Amino acid sequence: MSEMVKIESKRLGDCYYKLEHKSGLTILMAPMEGFNTAYAMFGTAYGSIDTCIKTDESGDFIKLPEGIAHYLEHKLFESEECSAFERYAKTGANANAFTAFDRTAYLFACSDNFEESIEILLDFVTHPYFTPETVEKEQGIIGQEIRMYDDSADWRVLFNLLGALYHKNPVKIDIAGTVESIAQITADLLYDCYNTFYNLHNMVLVVAGNFDMEAVERAADKVLEPAKEFYLERGNCDEPEEVAEKYVEQHLPVAVPMFNIGFKGKTGTEAENFCGSVLDEIFMEALCDDYTKVYRELYDEGLINATFGSEVFCGRDYISMLISGESREPEKVFERLKKEFEHLLEHGIPEDIFACAQKSVYGHYMRSSERVTGVAQSLFNCHFPGVEMYELIELAANATPESVIERVKSTYCAENSALSVIKP
Amino acid sequence: MQGKLIRKEIGEAAFMSFVQDPKFKSDRISLCFVTPLKKEKVTVNALVPFVLRKGCKSCPDFTELNKKLAQMYGAILDADVAKHGANQIIEVSIQFTDDRFAIDGENMAETAAKLLYDIAFEPNLDENGHFPEIDLELEREFLIDTIESDLNDKRVYAIGKALDLIYEDEPFGIKRYGYVEDAEAITAESLADAWRELVKTSRIEIMFTGPGDSSTAEKVFTERIATLDRKPVIAEKAPMIPYTPFKEAEESMDIVQGKLVMAFRMGAPETEHEKNSARMLSALYGGTAFSKLFMNVREKMSLCYYADSHFERGSGVLIVDCGIEFENREAAQKEIVRQLELIGEGDFTDEEFMSTKMAITNSLGSVGDTLYSVEGWYMPGILDGKILTPEEDAEEMNAITREDVIAMAKRAKPAAVFFLKGGENA
C-alpha cells in the first residue's frame, strides 16, 4: 500500500501531501483552493553536470559527452507513433521541459483534462524510443538552440563567469553542450543515460494547483512499473576553493557593457547548500540591495542602473552568490562590492538593514506560495536535496544578523570572486 | 475565474477597477496615465515614470523609499511605460503582502495606496517646480541605454527592424521608449511640464487586484484625484491599414545565428470576429508545439529551434520569426510562406483545428491564477472599451470556424522581411 503524509505550514496556512508510490516514485501534491490551473512536473536528479558516472553495469567511471542530458530531454518527447506534443494536443495542456545543471524536468500546465495529461506525462517519460535516424534529426534543432545562446549576451556573461569561478566543476559547461560534443551522441548512449538516471527512485512527480489527488494516484498505478534498485556513484571533481580566473571578458554586439560578479562558496551537501542559500540571500540583500549605502553610491555615480540585481546560484556540488547588471566601469563596481563584502563580515550587518533584508526575503518566499508554478517549482527544487519546502520561509523568518554572518564567513571569502564582462 | 471585474468612475476620466480574489496572499495596485501616443512626446513621457520612481514629497530620499518598501515585506514598486494602439501608458504599480500576512498587523493596503498616490501625483520637485537635477541626469542616461538595449537581444532587435519597415508613420511604429536624440534634449523644465500635462490631460486608470480590502485605497484615490485640476484628452483610435507595399532589408552583425522575421498584412481585420479569426490562424500556424511552423520548419526540416507567429491585435499584422543558419534563409522563408498558403488552401485537419482551440481555451483558463496576468488581461480590454472575462473570450474563440481561418489566411500578404545576418557590424 502506498502511504500518504500531510505536511502543513501554520504560517502560510498551506499544506501539501507526500506519497511514496509502490513503484518507487515519490509524489508530492499541493492542491490549491480557488486556482484553476494544475501544474505538474516529473523529473530526475540528472542534469548537465552529470558528465562522469559509475553504475553497477559500467564498473568503472565513464565519461559522457557534454550536453547529453539536454539532448535526452529533447528526444524523450518522441515515441514510435507520435511526439508527446501531439498527444498533449488532444488534451489542450501546455507542455514543456527543461534541463538544468543538476536536474531535468518535464512539465505541463492545464485548466482542463488533467487526468489524461498526467497519464501522457508519466507514460512518455517512462517509455524512451531512440533510433539513429531520430537522434540524427535533432542535431540541427539543438545546433540552432546552441547558436541562439552563443549570441545571447545574458547567457554568455553567466557562462564566462562560471568558467572563471570554477576550475573543474562541470557546472562551468554549457547545458546544451557544443555543436562538436553533441555530434558524439548516439541512440545507444542515450539509452545508457536513460537507464541509469531515469529510475523512479531517482525521480519525483510534483503537482500543484487545481487537480484531483486520486487522479494522480490512479494514473501512477496505471502507468508506472516498479523500478529496479538504484545505485549510482557520481564523479567527484575536487574543486579548489580559489577561483580559476579573476577576470574574463568577451566582445558581443550590446548597447552598454554587461557584467556578472560571482562570489564562490565552499560547497556543502546539497541540503546544506540549499538551506544555506536562504541566509546567503539575506546577506546579498544587505550587501547591495537598493536600500543600501553602497547601492546608492554606485547608482548616484552612474556606475549601475536599474538592471542591477543579485541571486544565489546553488545546487548539488556548487554554490555562489551572483550579481549582475550594466556598467561602463564594471571593475569599479566589483572593487566596491568586494570591499563592502569584507566590511560586513568584519563589522556585522546594521540592524535596520538586516530588518529590510530579512523582510524582503520573507516576502519573496511568501509570494512564491501564491502561484501554482511557484509552489510546484519549490516542491521540485526541495525534493532532491531532501529539504522540506516550508523550512525555507522559516529559515528566513528565524535568521539573525549573527547567524547570517556566521554562515557567510564559513562559506565565502571576498577574494574568491570573479568578474565577467561583455563589451560592445 | 474567481473574481469579477468591478469598475467605478472616481473622477473626471479617472476610473478604478477591482478584481477581488481571496486565494492570493498579496495585493497589487497599478496606476496608469493613458495619453495619446505622439512621436514628439513619447520620449519625454517615457522618462517620467523613471524619475517618479526615485521618490516623492512624503519620502524624498530614494534609499529611504526603498527601505520603506523592503520593510513592507519586500513590496515591489515598479515604474515603466507601454504602448497600446494609439495610446501611451505611463504606469506605476505596487505589489505588497496582504494584511493577513503582515507580522505586526499593519494596514498594508492603505499604506501602499497612499504611497502610490504620492509617487504619481506628489513628486519631489524643487522650488522651481523641477525634478532634482541628479535624477534627471541619471534617469535620462538610463532611458538612452534602455532605448539602445534592443540590440542586446538579437531576436527583439530583428523584430523591431521588421516593424520599422512596415509601420512608417503609423502610431504603431513609434518606439516604446522613444528616441535617443529626443532624450538628449530633455531638460528639467520639459520633464516637469510633461509630468504636469500627464496629470492634467491623461485618462487615469487604477486597478486593485487581490484579496485585500480595497475600500481604503478607493477612498485615498477618490478624495485626492478630486483635488486635481483636470482637462482630459482622449486618443482617437489608430486606423488599421489593409495592405502596404512589400519591403525587404537585411543587416550584418557579429553573430553566429541568423534571425529571420516576416510580417504579413491581413487586410485590416477590424471586427472582433475577424481579429479572433486572425488570432486563431496565428495559433494554428505558429503558436503551439504542434503548429504548422513547429512541425515543419523545426521538426521536419530541422532548420531551427524556434519558429513562432503572433498576431498584433492593434495594427492587424501577423509576425513570424525564427533563428537559423545564415545559408538556410531561402529554405526557411519559402517554407514559412508555403505553410501559410497551405492553411489558406484548407490543408489542416479538424483534429489540428480542435487541438488549437483547446490550447487557447486552456491557456485562457489560467489567466485568473496570478495577480499580474489578471491585470494584464483586463487592462487592454479596458483601453479598447470591450471588457471580456477570459471565459467569454474563450467562447468567442470557440465560435471561430475552419472557414474563418481559411478566409483569413487567404487575406495574408507579405509586407516585410528582415534578415539579420553574420559579418561585420553595419
Image: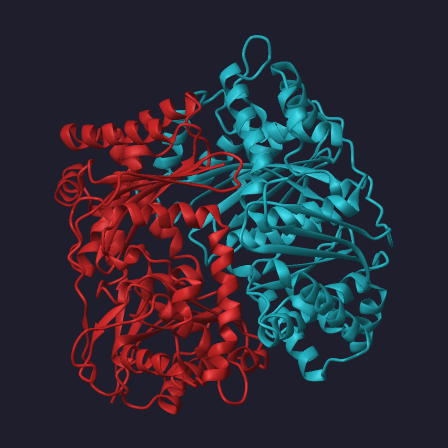
Q: Residue at x 36, y 62 (%)?
A: A100
Q: Nearer the viewer, residue A189 or B161?
A: A189
Answer left or right for A244 relative to A215.
Answer: left
Chain B is which colour?
cyan
Please identify the quadrant where the N terminus of chain A is shown. bottom left
Residue B275: image location, x then y, percent: 78, 61
Q: Quadrant of residue B150?
A: top right
Q: Residue at x 51, y 45 (%)?
A: B28
Residue B146 percent across, percent down from the top left: 56, 35
| Vertical order, A142 against A369 (above or below) | below
Which image quarter: residue A203? bottom left
Q: Residue at x 38, y 25 (%)?
A: A298
Report the label total: 0
Q: Nearer the viewer, residue B177 or A175?
A: A175
Q: Measured from the top left, where is residue A285 in percent x and y?
A: 31, 38
Q: Which chain is red?
A: A
- Point out residue B171 in the picture as x, y percentages from the top left corner: 78, 40
Residue B335 appears in the rendering: yes
Which residue is at the far top?
Answer: B127
- Viewer-nearest residue: A14 or B126: B126
